[in-house]
Amino acid sequence: MTLRIRVNPVACEAHGLCAEVLPEWIELDEWGYPILDGEELPSQLVAHARRAAKACPTLAIVLGGE
Amino acid sequence: MTGFSTAPLWYATRSTAIVAFVLLTVSMFLGIAATQRSIASRYWPRFATQDLHRNVSLLALGFITAHILTTLLDTFVYVGWWAAFVPGTSPYRRFWVALGTLAFDAILVVIASSLVRHRLPLRWWRAVHWSVYVVWPLAFVHFLETGTDAAHGRFGLWLDIVALLSLLVAVAMRLSAANGPSGPLRSVAGRPR
Amino acid sequence: MTRAAPVTWPRRLLAGIGDSDDLYGGHLETWGPLPAASALPPAAVIDAVEKSGLLGRGGAGFPAGRKMRTVAAAANRRPVVVANGAEGEPASGKDVLLLSRAPHLVLDGVQLAARAVGADEAHVAVHRGSPAAGVVRAALVRRGSSDAVPVQLHEVPSRYVASEETALVHYLNGGEARPTFSPPRPFEQGVGRRPTLVNNVETLAHVAAIARHGDEWFREVGDRDEPGTLLVSISADGLARRVAEVPTGTTIGAVADRARVARDSAGAVLVGGYFGSWLPAAYAWQLPLTHRAMRSAGAALGAGVVAVLPASSCGIAETARVMAYLAAHNAGQCGPCLNGLPAIATALSRLASGGWDERWWPALERWLAVVPGRGACRHPDGAVRFASTALSVFAEDVARHRSGRPCAAAAGPAWLPTPRPAEGWR
């Protein structure tokens, strides 16, 4: 099961919980906004990615399954 | 309804009420604090506050439910089973119990909406969640008026005051932070790092 | 260095413009009536546009026929057509020109596009206060019920990003003219959640021309793989901005020659628009105006802007001013753009006018790297491309400015226009 993780930049308010939950994949820029490259997630990070999507206060993390 | 000794139920109702109220207050405090950047550190990420808020809220719901059940099972005062959900149906202290019922109804909606947060438009979830600013005062007054500890003793009154103050502090922190540097959209134009 | 001999460029879209004051009468004389649906049914329209090889003229260069076919194939809901005449690019004048001098050609294109995709409503968007608004309104009245599909004119706020596809759709749906997160893109879900065909007005004008004369006629002129003509807005020193219709594949140098631009004294050319790229002049002159050639030069055709930097202007100062404009025109929605663009603009302004601190340089490079691709629209991407290409094309100047010796030209008058954003998003 492949998963891609993106951020909706309009909804994002830089709370930064996604980077706390998934530091292996998500980095924050100097203003607190997540840098996501849209690549496929390695399988061991999928559960954490779902957790990150749940943690976002503005539901800005978007997961796309295949 | 014989067979139920009322004294243990009476104590159970009062103690679950106190614990429920404390948990509700802690949950409110955490919910307000969770919006602040300043509460996060290397050893305490924000999702920990978020998780704690969620768990404390669910625990509070558990204790509220226990409080309601023990009240309804207690034959010393007759409240009536409908009063759990329908405000104004309790013959005992109709108005003050109704406030508690209302608060309980609202808490159920808030928690239910949070459990299905991902399926709701964000605006709806937010609007429902904001009702906690009404729920807590309802619980506060309900506690004050129906809780005999508050009416006749000192302990309940002090608890109320401490709870209220702690929430005022949280709200003050939140309001001052909105004007301060921890807002998310602060631009750093003009400052190289 | 030999210059190409002046060529005669065919006037197609611009044919008949200025010949008569009666826009409708003049249009009919030049182009004849719109082919009826019986003579040119929907499938035939799509076929003709596809075979013609017409690429969208709004900047993306997407094949127009394929876009039409995709929207037409949307099974469950009736599509909508939107003609995008909200020319946000200050250095471009082609959309306003088309709408104010040949509105009926564009409106014919709107009808044909609607016929092709099976739309039952159409919209034309222009900037509020644009000279084109009144002309289009009058043209619609003149056409009256001869238009099979009702067309509504909308004046959107005069802001750079308002003309972005999703921003337009959002506005038409009753919201603000700010871009929205995609997917879904308008061709899937747009106005009223219906599949929406958004086309630049120049694209639609070409569609109207193709409907009269056929796809082979369209292919007679221009580049073999990207045929047809292109409207180009030329700005240069001492030259009032003008719009020319050139065959695709014409070199930038030939365009400059036609406009009698002094090529030898020019140092750099801005191609595409404010979201485009700076190129060294010597390199630019031999570049053909095709999407293909532009891409391999690290540039883009964009809105067809060709702006030749005057010898007396400082490239860095112009870039800084335009960056400030782009920063002021962001939609205020996405963190990387709304933080990054002002930061870059401030740094460039210090670089241009003095007050530069070398510690800014790594920050500037970092911002240019971290901002693109992270917004809801391509505004930050274009702005960063504009700034990055400037730093590379003006590298010598940059080195001088960095060492504290800005050129005297930096304090000179502004050349590229940078209008203020309008108030409000609605």
Image (cartoon, rainbow, N blue to C red):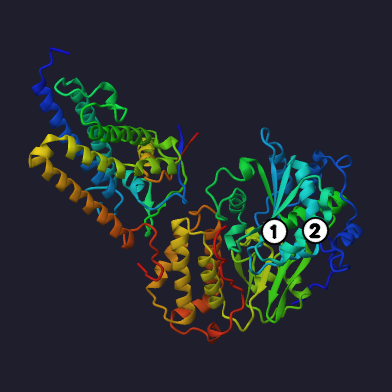
Q: Could one spot residue C86 in this view of the protein?
A: no
Disc nearer the start of the sequence (1/2): 1
Badge 2 amino acid? Ala
Mark 1: which secondary structure? Answer: loop
Estimate how packed mark 2 is, as few (under 14), some (14 to 19) or many (20 or more) residues with alpha carbons within 10 Å: some
Residue located at (26% from left, 53% from top)? B171
x, y percent for residue B115: 36, 33
Q: Mark 1 and mark 2: span between their CA atoms?
A: 15 Å
Circle number at residue C85: 1
Q: Is residue B15 above or below residue C346?
A: above
Residue located at (55% from left, 56% from top)? C378
Mark 2: which secondary structure? Answer: helix
Q: Is residue C149 above or below residue C302?
A: above
Q: Is residue C167 left or right of residue B182?
A: right
Q: Is residue C410 above or below residue C382?
A: below
Residue located at (71% from left, 59% from top)? C290
Numbered marks: total: 2
Chain for disc number 1: C
Badge 1 amino acid? Gly
x, y percent for residue C73: 70, 36
The front one of B19 and C406 is B19
